[in-house]
Image (cartoon, helix red, strand yellow):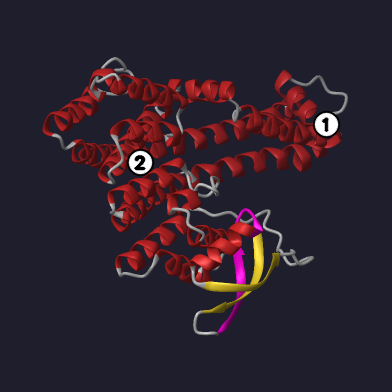
Amino acid sequence: MKFDYQARSEDGQIQSGVVEARTKEDAIAVLQKNKLYVSFIEEEKPAVYSKEIKIFERVNKKDLVLFSRQLSVMFKSGVPIVESLKSIAEQTGKNKLKEQIEKIAEKVESGNTLSQSLSSHPKTFSPFYIGMVKSGEISGKLSEALEYLADHLERDYNFNNKIIGAMIYPGFVLFVFVSIIFFMLTFVIPGLGEIFEGMDLPLMTRIVLGASDFVARWWWVPVLLLVFLAIFGTRFFRTDKGRKILDKIILGTPLIGDFSKKVSLVRVAENLSTLISGGLPIVQAIEVTADVIGSNTYREIMLKTRDRVRRGELISSTLLKHPKYFPSLFVQMIMVGEKTGKIDSSLGNVVNFYQGDIDRALDGLIKLIEPVMIILLGGVVGFFVISILMPIYQISI
């Protein structure tokens, strides 16, 4: 709850503002703690139509990278955390992020830790992010933890952008592919139906004419079906059962499955390395990594690893039991790190190795997808052309 207040400072100056607390008594206690003598306080009433519609606004990784970097630099320079947060809030261009940072600043000012304040916005700040901040608070190295976070988020952001960028061309080819089919079925084929009327047509031609007639009359049926499948699929694959099925499909698909495994390995190594470097206990680091990794299969393996590490076993001994998902190179690098006590640096080396491997795999995958899609597009267009030319050829004979 927010409270509007007016108070007098020790030197007699009148101050007014807003304080956040659970009750009015807590708000008064916060103000008195800051040596302010309250003369007026009441619960803030939200102004009608004062809030902007933020349905389509969201905080992305780029925003978090910038926020973490700015907070790290300001905190390292000796600026108090509350002042740093308020300054960043004033500079940010996104209203949603600005509002969240202001609320975080108010909670910190009320006596909460930064990690506790961040946890009130779980959609923006992941368990990974909060865990890193909490470890920085405990170890007294908050600025270093924020710097680790900014570096990690920046690498993850660039990595995701690289994958998305690589998918643009195949996506464009697929769009052209669907557009050409729709154009031919809607505008080209219907005009030929009258020409072929009364003729004994080949099966290919009858299929094309039937499809064209269906699209011309009932075009809204496939559109509604696609919308329904998109909505149903999105909701289903967000459930535990749906995620498991989708994960098995992706990991079991040739080429795509191998690529997906390498991406998951990089995320496991990257997250673990960052969390351990930031001072988080290994068991907690494994648990947080399991929650943010994305793949349900790898999540289950990491949770099993967490349980075994709690019983005193090594990470490598658990991962050895899953050679299908964790190659021997990956496990041996972790084993070396466990023996030398430098598991974070060993995981960093794993990231560097697989990052290059992923780049090469991504290039190979794109080079393979492009000709396959072009051949598929050419085959469908060829099917249409042949189905049209066959009856014309019969007339000429």
> Which amino acid lies under the numbered mark 1 shown in the image of this protein?
Asp
Q: Nearer the viewer, residue 392 or 253?
A: 253
Q: Nearer the viewer, residue 60 or 234?
A: 60
Look at the image and say whether residue 388 sits in the magenta stretch: no
> Which amino acid lies under the numbered mark 2 shown in the image of this protein?
Asp
Q: Quadrant of the N terminus?
A: bottom right
Q: Is residue 194 above or below residue 203?
A: below
Answer with the quarter of the image where residue 240 lies. top right
Answer with the quarter of the image where residue 377 lies. top right
Look at the image and say whether residue 22 sits in the magenta stretch: yes
- The residue identified by callout 2 is 363
Q: Nearer the viewer, residue 367 or 135?
A: 135
Which region of the structure is painted magenta?
A: 13-24
Mark 1 secondary-structure assignment? helix
- The residue identified by callout 1 is 213
Q: Residues within 10 Å of mark 2 (few under 14, many from 20)?
A: few
